[in-house]
Amino acid sequence: MPRRSLPTVRGIGARAIDNVLRLGYATRFIGLTIAHSGTCLARPRLVVRELYYTGVLSLIIILVSGLFVGMVLGLQGYQTLTTYGSESALGVLVALSLVRELGPVVSALLFASRAGSAMTAEIGLMKATEQLSAMEMMAVDPVARVVAPRFWAGVISMPLLAAMFSAMGVFGGYVVGVVLIGVDEGSFWSQMQGAVDVREDIVNGVIKSFVFGVAVTWIALFEGYDAPPTAEGVSGATTRTVVTSSLAILGLDFILTSFMFSGV
Amino acid sequence: MASDTLIEIKDVNFAYGRRPILTGINMTIPRGKVVALMGISGSGKTTLLRLIGGVMKPTSGEVWVDGQCTGGLDQQGIYRMRRRMGMLFQFGALFTDLSVYDNVAFQMREHTGLPESMIRDLVMMKLHAVGLRGAAKLMPGELSGGMARRVALARAIALDPMIMMYDEPFTGLDPISLGVIANLVRELNDTLGTTSLVVTHDVQEALDVVDYVYYLSDGRMKAQGTPEELRADTDPLVRQFVHGEAEGPVAYQYPSGDYAAELKMGRDGRGRRAA
């Protein structure tokens, strides 16, 4: 019996060691990326180009999703609040839900699926087609030229996308709550203004989306850079980017929320 | 190191872990010559190219490039050395998000402070040298295999390198493109005054354009000489490779069990007939 279970135990051990090794490589990778970010400062056009691909091209999915999430919040919130006769607080419910949680989390999940997977596939294919090797042979560091601009573009665009998601969501909640259902417009906006705190809610939401931006971009870039240079390798890496990023977002959200709002 | 020698490889051994890839390699590449490094797939040719480019370091032995031992160079030193090297990859390795023009201009923009007007003139000169000036605005996806290889060649010679390295430049090309690339290797070497190292297993094309040949097998240097000497070599290993013979010291079959026994394993009538 012990002999039969030996390969299983050995397999678990090998996987554990492999994962710890990969975590080490990933940490070294982000360290190198930050250390080689000087090129981005010297040539901001590299970052601006990536901002277009990661940020601007993600706008449509972010805005449309934000609008619908806000509309659903408006509808569901109204149904619940009307039970207690406090439908005038609909603006507060919609705004706080979006700014504190749904904005950063849902936009980060969408960002991981849309921009993160694209980053992994692009870098993985660049590796598979020897473009990164060619760059190195031309004495150009691929981490500085390819990875760092994408990293900073992801980190910069994530909070902006989350802000736009929340703004669009508030608009969606307004359309459903005020325009369609008929909640009083004055109380919708004034209660929202009174309840939403810049430091407690908005800044914390921005911090969250910044952290998610770092996590998603880091995972996406590392998976692409570390992908085996085959079709199967790149497809596996792309899948891992979406799965790992999504889990990281949800896990980090819980940790950040418990730190930020534990005293509330 | 003599001044007419550009690259010298002295007693180089290289291994991945315990698996030896190169054993006791000695090689000299004189300035201005086109030298071929031949051998079947998996013989260690590309590894040797990487050692010269400083991508990897030898387990033991020394690689000297233009009077510098690559083993003693740090990352910046390796990068300084690579700026004077050009490399053509097996399938071109063009940057797919950049146009043909931007691919050729890439190194100029990265390493020189030249104004864009001068870069434009230089790019056009390089593209003209490979006959693709008219393709400057195309994207790599719009090029044929042969054209992509020529654009990659223009990109590799962008900074007038002292040495050009070609990794399987003839693979997967039609006969016309193959002839064009082979002639370009020779022409560019002579007109630009560079030194070329061609890693290939396309024997006839290479033997027509190179000055000297090294033959690598199982990580060891098995033969060397001028193309004529190699064609006349009587060593069975070299003969089999140069003349493309199926039978010889290099086995066609991957090591496996007894064929008849394997076919009879099914124990049905068809299996027995096939055996």
Image: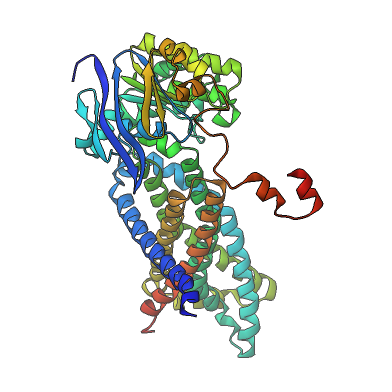
User: Which residue appears at 28% of the width and 39% of the height?
Assistant: B57
Q: Position of residue B214 (x, y in %)?
A: 38, 22
The chosen color scheme is: rainbow
Residue at the far right in the pictured view? B269
Residue A219 in percent (x, y) is at 44, 58
Whole-percent x, y for residue A235 in the image: 56, 52
User: How many numbered marks are there?
Assistant: 0
User: Is residue B12 shown above or below A38?
Assistant: above
Give me the residue at 65% from left, 76% from top.
A75
Q: In which quarter of the image is the N terminus of chain B?
A: top left
Q: Quick check: can you spot residue A190?
A: no
Q: Residue at x 60, y 85 (%)?
A: A81
Does residue B16 appear in this view?
yes
Residue toward you, A31 or B206? B206
Q: Which residue lies furthest to the bottom in this view?
A: A84
Is B240 displayed left or right of A44 in the figure?
Answer: right
Image coords of residue B178 (percent x, y): 55, 18
Compared across the picture, whether B126 is left or right of B71 comes to: right
The quarter of the image holding the C terminus of chain B is top right
Instruction: Name the foreground residue: B56 vs A139.
Output: B56
Quarter of the figure with residue B122: top left
Q: On the rendered structure, is A108 left or right of B220?
A: right
Q: Nearer the viewer, residue A20 or A159?
A: A20
Placement of A84 over or under A77, stated as above or below: below
